[in-house]
Amino acid sequence: MVVSTAVRLASGRPSGRASLIQFLGKDGWAARRSATVAAPSSTAAPAASVSAPAVATAAAAPPTPPPLTPSTQATFAPEMVTTVPPSLYTDTPASNMRKVISRRLTESKSTVPHFYTSIEIPLDNILQLRKTLQKDFETKVSVNDFVIKASAMALRDVPELNGTYDAKTQSQRTFSQVDISVAVATPTGLITPIVPSTTSLSLTEISSKVKDLATRARDNKLTPEEYQGGTFCISNLGMFGISEFSAVINPPQGAILAVGGGERKIVPGTFSEEDGSTTKPEIRTVMTARLSADRRVVDEATAALFLGSLKEYLNQPKLLML
């Protein structure tokens, strides 16, 4: 007896016809059921004369798939479906600066192994010194100027962070001179003008230099040598009310410091195991600084040394005036 196609496809399956429907699909099963069976031709040999190997070959042959009908043809969803009408949005071509920023930061985030370390730094001593400078000497210095100067001194103490990485030559380059890039927001994008020889500048010199660079950066009047290069970068969003954030490294520099704004917090008291003395809890203004570093340039221990040195200078801001 010749085994039918449906029986052969369903053989060995636990669910019989249900498995066949799942295999062919509902439309395919309906098409197979409604197909007319051709009558045997007069020249065909009788069923009894068919040899056993021929029956086995016919049983092993795969079934002919049913013809595609409009109901069985596959439909594909578009790659992007826009549900917002064009009248409600505007497409603006990216500026040349925005294209450069997109290319460089995408390359940085995808090829540079970032790691992050954070530290909380009290600002009360800095705020008190600022008031003294403004009252007694009529000198206005921002918290950001203190951060720039303290970072330069910390880089002098931990020179491993004052370096770059060359991916082509697979080499690390450490600089003896500290040139800090300061991120400045402009209408066309973010730019990082450089404060050269930062360790040799006083707080007032840093303040005037940053103001001049920021003003000319917003007016698009910087020369290429004033924003190309640098050995370290600082991005401060504290004046925008941001408490903490993570910055993307600007290659080939090895690190960037993200500075948040100061917040009033309750600092727990301390206990000394040597003499048993304790201190009371205090309310202090605390700033969070987060370092994004290239793991190919420095490791976590070196980053911790830098942040510890930065905190020490900011805790004793008078050291920055020597």
Image (spheres, rainbow, N blue to C red):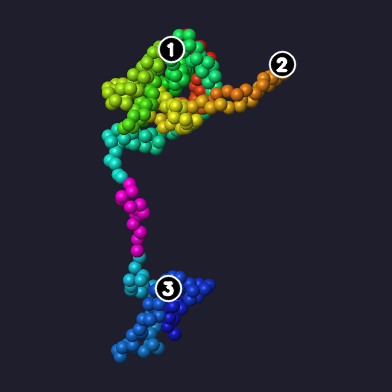
Numbered disc total = 3
- Is-magenta flag for residue 81? yes
Q: Secondary structure at mark 3?
A: helix
Residue 226: % across, % down: 31, 21
Q: According to the image, label 2 marks what residue?
A: 275
Residue 295: % across, % down: 45, 30
Q: CA distance from mark 1 to mark 3?
A: 84 Å
Q: Secondary structure at mark 2?
A: loop
Circles 1 and 3, Cβ within 8 Å, touching? The answer is no
Against 97, is 48 above or below? below
The local crowd at label 3, few if under 14, some if 14 to 19, many if 20 or more residues have their Cα within 10 Å, is: few
Q: According to the image, label 1 marks what residue?
A: 139
Q: Amino acid at mark 2?
A: Asp
The local crowd at label 2, few if under 14, some if 14 to 19, many if 20 or more residues have their Cα within 10 Å, is: few
- Which residue is located at x 44 percent, y 78 percent? 6
Residue 39: % across, % down: 33, 88
The overriding secondary structure of the stretch rendered in magenta is loop
* Near-viewer residue (76 or 145): 145
| Quadrant (top left, top right, bottom left, bottom right) of the N terminus | bottom left
Determine the image quadrant of residue 68: bottom left
- Which residue is located at x 38 percent, y 26 percent? 183
Q: According to the image, label 3 marks what residue?
A: 26
Residue 311: % across, % down: 52, 20
